[in-house]
Image (cartoon, rainbow, N blue to C red):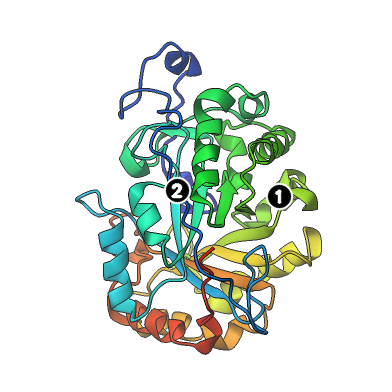
Amino acid sequence: MSRHRAGPRRLYAVVLVAMALFVAGIGVWAGGFGGKGDEDLPKNAASGTLPTGPCAPDDKLAPECGAWWGAYIPYDEKGSLTEPVYAFEKKIGRKLDLVYTYHDMSGNDLDGKLLTDEEQELGRDRMLMLAWESTVWTEPHHENYTETQLGWKNIASGQYDEEIIDPQIRRIKAYGKRVFFSFDQEVDARIKEGAGTPAEYVAAYRHLYERFEKLGADNVVWVWTVSGYLGSADEMKQLYPGDDYVDWIGMDQYNYFGCHNTDNWKDFEESQRPTYDWLLENISAEKPLMMAEFATAPDLADPDRQYQWYKEIPSVIGSMPKVKAMVHWNRATSDEKRCDLTVNEGPALKGYREAGESRYFRQTVPTR
């Protein structure tokens, strides 16, 4: 799952364990490296007819009118994903269009298995976005953001195809229903973490894309996701896999006011517009764009600021017409109240709830 590579992500330690340990079978917390092959494949979830009319989404799930309203909701203390999603939806007074989840490449059933039973349940009447990291997480659900890099050059070489990658592709293929898919989200921040070079990432991305094609998993909508931190502009240009390999462009931008060594308040537009404009000018002006993670920290001295930040979204987003999906990051990045990015209560909840009531975010979700 995301660790905010442009901000809080930098604050967490990355555990660099030699890959030889995994190859030798010295396992991770969940009992080893590798999956269960093709056992227990998901059932085909595609159902019903496609939405029609002037606002119907296209074959890459981009709605003609407005934008999807989604969120990342962390697992609860009991290890459930569905219960916190349902509870969140009750708070905000509507069903999410899109639920975003994160996975590693451990192959274990907890985090390395794409389309878990709970994801499949949520996907019955919502869209799913799966982020797949080329790492093995040290703790369940990436608890303290520690991991081992598998390395882009090793992904590109096919080293993990048979044991890790192909079984998960077959799971997605069996699911049938279209899913959004992101490989190594916030990729511009992974270089310094030891994942490899931009050229190696492009090779790994294209290799993964081609494995999906070879195995016939054509129900994937590819989202290339960067932090959007403009200090990484040169790297982002080098990391782009090419128009033929990308369906959507994703960006993860926040208002970190008072948190992570920042002290200036940015309203919604100020926090999103610079990266939005840069991506259109430097990467693609044609691809639909997803705010794949967005949120604001609170101003503890003026709680109404957080309410206004969310409330103004509907009045601003129409001036960014390429944005076709918005996914809120609903997880605190630390125990400090000033870094709480959730909208679980108070002014944040009120503002987010009001924004989600806008007709701009009321499109018919496809069931296939």
Q: Is residue 95 above or below residue 16?
A: below
Residue drawn at (51%, 86%), measured in percent from left and top?
312
**10 Å crowding of disc 1: few (<14), some (14-19), many (20+):** many
Residue 357 locus on image (x, y percent)? 43, 86
Front residue of this view, candidates 156 and 178: 178
Residue 77 locus on image (x, y percent)? 21, 51
Q: How far apart in space, not on screen, are marks 2 and 1 (Cα)?
A: 21 Å
Amino acid at pointer 2:
Tyr
Amino acid at pointer 1:
Met
Residue drawn at (36%, 22%), measured in percent from left and top?
32
Residue underneath mark 1 = 236
Quarter location, residue 342: bottom left
Quarter location, residue 241: top right
**10 Å crowding of disc 2: few (<14), some (14-19), many (20+):** many
Q: Nearer the viewer, mark 2 or mark 1?
A: 2
Q: Residue 267: in sight, yes or no?
A: no
Q: Secondary structure at mark 1?
A: helix
Q: Which comes before the other along the chain, label 2 or label 1?
A: 2
Instruction: Indicate left or right for 141 with 194 as reference.
Output: left
Instruction: Indicate left or right for 8 with 210 as reference.
Output: left
Residue underneath mark 2 = 102
